[in-house]
Amino acid sequence: MKADLTYSSYLHLEDLLNAQHPRSADGQVEHDEMLFIIIHQVYELWFKQILHELDYMMGLLRQQDDIRAVHTVRRVLTILKTVVTQIDVLETMTPLEFNSFRSYLEASSGFQSAQFRQLEFALGYKRLAMLQHFTPDTPTYAQLEQRFAQPTLWDAFLHYLAQKGYAVPTELLERDVTQMVTAHEGLQAILIEVYRTDPQTAQLCEYWVDLDEGLQEWRYRHVKMVERTIGTKMGTGGSAGVGYLQTTLKPFFPDLWIIRSAF
């Protein structure tokens, strides 16, 4: 007889709650390693949900369903607020507490978060060199390759504008989507027109700015958290640490920021 579905079985809580394995457990268990593991596991769950929402949102834009697209981006923005707030929890861990188990992390690093790399790719921050940090011929690598080759949220928005009758330059609509999203003066003129004549689409643009700002806020808080915890030392797993993280503080949608000075 099939067992009844329960709260625990539906959520696979046995698997979820037994997925934390502190490396320091082979000697004296360091108290704060559990917090470190859980925070980063929760990050990965939120990254998974954001990717899920972005894929849905791109489909809505292709269908010209801007009402549900707005609803979806607002959900993502709410998730980002939660993601940023998690840093407050992580910052309750002092440098001494982190260093009590840091050596157990060995070569592992948040730099190796495949889902965050997918998130960057989905938003147009594409760098082929990022794939070298992952093992070829694995499902993770295949997912990254697929995401790298796919159009971005910005591409979906450009086609949305074109379908609404805006003269989006052909080179943008047919661009190589494996390249990073960059600023385009011709598009900026169109966006200025949108802001002046099309309040509904302009509001959608403002949500893209909110999304961009929310991601930059998370990056900034992450940089300061790392600096607060390890200073300017090399990052976990041999990454450049704060020095590298500071270089990532740049917009995903540069055109929407450049036009601010035109009003």
Image (tube, rainbow, N blue to C red):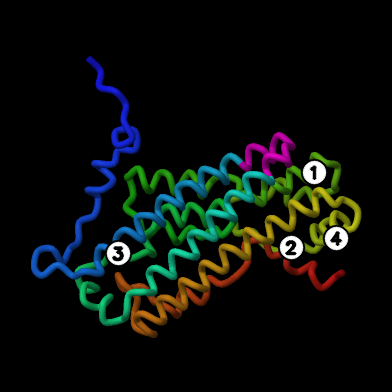
Identify the image quadrant of residue 22: bottom left
| Magenta residue check for 235 | no
Disc 4 marks which residue? 192
**Which amino acid lies under the numbered mark 4 shown in the image of this protein?**
Ile
Q: Nearer the viewer, residue 64 or 228?
A: 228
- Image: magenta residue range: 57-69
Residue 46 appearing in the image: yes
What is the crowding at mark 2: few (fewer than 14 residues within 10 Å), some, or many (at least 20)? some
Q: If you read the primary sequence from the N terminus, does the residue marked by circle 4 or circle 3 appear first?
A: 3
Identify the image quadrant of residue 257: bottom right
Q: Position of residue 254 (x, y in %)?
A: 69, 65
**Which amino acid lies under the numbered mark 3 shown in the image of this protein?**
Leu
Disc 1 marks which residue? 162
- Residue 256 - label: 2
Q: CA distance from mark 4 to mark 1?
A: 15 Å
- Residue 35 - label: 3
**Quick one: SS at disc 3?**
helix
Residue at left 75%, top 43%?
Answer: 160
Q: CA distance from mark 4 to mark 3?
A: 46 Å
